[in-house]
């Protein structure tokens, strides 16, 4: 390539205004929202990095497809287009559309798990964990140990611990109905999983007759990291790499709100005929007929086109680079982040940044509140508010205290990111004044979504 600047490989056709608020307004808004960023009104947020899920911009190609949406109840043309797009990449026999990823999880676990079972995974996402536990089964996180050290720079910190995987299967005969690998490892810092690791996990699972499922939400970003970092893949296309990743699995759950480039949707895909039949029955009960699964025909069209666009090399190059761009600025300025930068997000290591706040006062949550207060930026805590409450009601600090800045796909430009960096450098300059928070009220599961909190010592800043 002649020039080194990596540009957004699109131009903007439709714009959506975003709104500035004052610091004084945000102070009131935070109190009204119970110091929980999930409870803010989105229009009170300037730059929204709460999630990369369903928040992306859709392309003109997707809108063209959406206009062709076939809304027939059964056998719609849009379903077959969607099914072809999914099987082209995954080669799984059965493709079951769902309204989003967690519905695929609920249907899979509802059919495949029973009480007392164990599901090993590099790291379960929160809804995945909750859906496993809802079945009375254990969601076991077994990332490689280096995946839990935020500062370590290694190419594939998302890998699953193969030795532990085999040990869990061998020591619990009949109790591991499936194993999972999440690509990329979202709760573990958006870190990729290597092809070698997926292949080896697959060999272990096949040897013991345990089906392996990919939680494939960010499969294209994972494929790009394999292309960039794993020997032997530099000359393969992202599609070829993705196809190989799926070839080692027996099925996948997918949130099309991520690498499906859609605002809603997901699917469950698998090879086992009997299990697929059972899943389809459950699907009809709660999601819809198997050719729409709770989605409109135009949603299926948007996903079909999105799955094709997400594997474009210029898109993936820009995507991963634009996230790393922020990571590089933060690293240069001494702000601790999970290294190296993930595919969809930068994760600030709040434990390292705010050592004066104990885990019992939720340092990552406090930091995310101050980022909103000072800059109108919304992020999400992935720490002890999200993961600290155990199924038995006990409180145990999470492995890491992270603030995730997840980037919606094709939405923000470089100047948005420069603004963000400025906000973060300012917050870093006042970090010694940031104080902890406490939970005032919370539900027993997935508490971070609706809990109400308060400053643990009167104010957020000393
Ligand atoms: N698995 C992973 C790895 C995820 O990141 C998510 C969603 C899901 C499953 C569930 O999919 O939202 O379509 O039901 N993650 C979003 C996030 C919400 O913000 O990381 P869903």
Image (spheres, grey):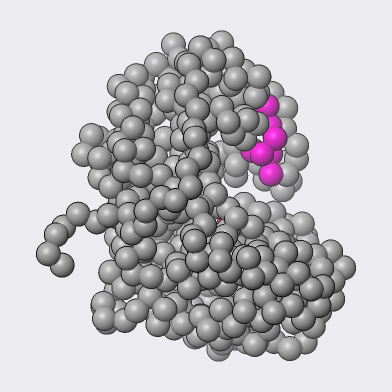
Residue at 44%, 83% (x, y): give it: 244
List x then y, in percent, for residue 124.
Answer: 58, 58
The picture quadrant where one finds residue 348 is: top left
Residue furthest right as drawn: 285
Residue at 72%, 48% (x, y): give it: 391
Q: Is residue 6 above or below residue 49?
A: below
Asked whether the viewer can see residue 160, the reply is no
Left-right relation of 35 to 351: right
Q: Is residue 104 magenta?
A: no
Q: Is residue 92 above or below residue 402?
A: below
List x then y, in percent, for residue 261.
Answer: 52, 61
List x then y, in percent, for residue 122.
Answer: 51, 64
In the image shown, does 214 or 356 lie closer to the viewer?
Answer: 214
Residue at 36%, 34% (x, y): give it: 420
Residue furthest left as drawn: 2
Asked whether the viewer can see residue 236, the reply is yes
Residue at 47%, 16% (x, y): give it: 23
List x then y, in percent, for residue 59.
Answer: 49, 60
Q: Is residue 368 above or below residue 261?
A: above
In the image shown, does 267 or 312 lie closer to the viewer?
Answer: 312
Q: The C terminus is located in which quarter?
A: top left
The picture quadrant where one finds residue 252 is: bottom right
Q: Is residue 60 above or below residue 244?
A: above
Left-right relation of 188 to 331: right
Q: The N terminus is located in which quarter?
A: bottom left
Left-right relation of 316 to 293: left
Residue range in magenta is 446-453
Label total for image: 0
């Amino acid at each position: 390539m002649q020039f080194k600047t990596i540009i957004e490989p699109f131009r903007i056709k439709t714009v959506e205004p975003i709104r500035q608020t004052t610091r004084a307004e945000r102070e009131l808004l935070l109190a009204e929202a119970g110091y929980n960023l999930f409870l803010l009104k989105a229009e009170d947020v300037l730059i929204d990095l709460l999630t990369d899920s369903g928040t992306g911009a859709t392309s003109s190609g997707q809108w063209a497809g959406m206009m062709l949406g076939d809304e027939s109840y059964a056998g719609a043309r849009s379903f077959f287009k969607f099914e072809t797009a999914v099987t082209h990449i995954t080669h799984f026999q059965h493709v079951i559309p769902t309204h989003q990823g967690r519905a695929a999880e609920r249907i899979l676990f509802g059919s495949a798990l029973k009480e007392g079972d164990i599901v090993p995974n590099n790291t379960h996402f929160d809804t995945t964990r909750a859906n496993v536990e809802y079945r009375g089964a254990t969601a076991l996180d077994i990332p490689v140990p280096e995946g839990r050290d935020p500062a370590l720079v290694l190419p594939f910190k998302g890998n699953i611990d193969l030795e532990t995987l085999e040990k869990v299967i061998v020591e619990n005969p009949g109790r591991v109905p499936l194993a999972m690998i999440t690509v990329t490892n979202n709760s573990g810092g958006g870190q990729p999983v290597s092809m070698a690791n997926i292949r080896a996990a697959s060999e272990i699972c096949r040897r013991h007759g345990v089906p392996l499922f990919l939680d494939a939400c960010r499969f294209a970003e994972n494929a790009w990291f394999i292309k960039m970092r794993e020997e032997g893949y530099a000359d393969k296309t992202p599609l070829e790499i993705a196809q190989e990743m799926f070839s080692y699995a027996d099925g996948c759950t997918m949130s099309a709100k991520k690498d499906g480039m859609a605002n809603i949707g997901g699917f469950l895909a698998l090879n086992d005929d009997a299990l697929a039949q059972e899943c389809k029955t459950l699907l009809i009960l709660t999601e819809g007929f198997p050719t729409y699964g709770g989605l409109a025909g135009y949603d299926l069209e948007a996903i079909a086109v999105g799955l094709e666009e997400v594997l474009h090399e210029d898109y993936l190059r820009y995507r991963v680079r634009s996230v790393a761009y922020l990571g590089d600025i933060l690293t240069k300025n001494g702000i601790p982040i999970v290294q190296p930068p993930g595919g969809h997000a930068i994760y600030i290591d709040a434990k390292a940044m705010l050592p004066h706040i104990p885990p019992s006062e939720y340092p990552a949550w406090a930091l995310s509140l101050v980022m909103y207060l000072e800059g109108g930026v919304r992020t999400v805590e992935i720490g002890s508010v999200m993961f600290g409450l155990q199924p038995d009601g006990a409180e145990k600090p999470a492995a890491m205290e992270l603030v995730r800045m997840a980037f919606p796909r094709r939405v923000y430009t470089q100047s948005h990111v420069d603004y963000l960096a400025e906000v973060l450098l300012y917050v870093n300059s006042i970090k010694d004044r940031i104080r902890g928070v406490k939970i005032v009220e919370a539900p027993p599961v997935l508490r971070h979504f609706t809990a109400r909190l308060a400053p643990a010592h009167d104010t957020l800043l000393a």
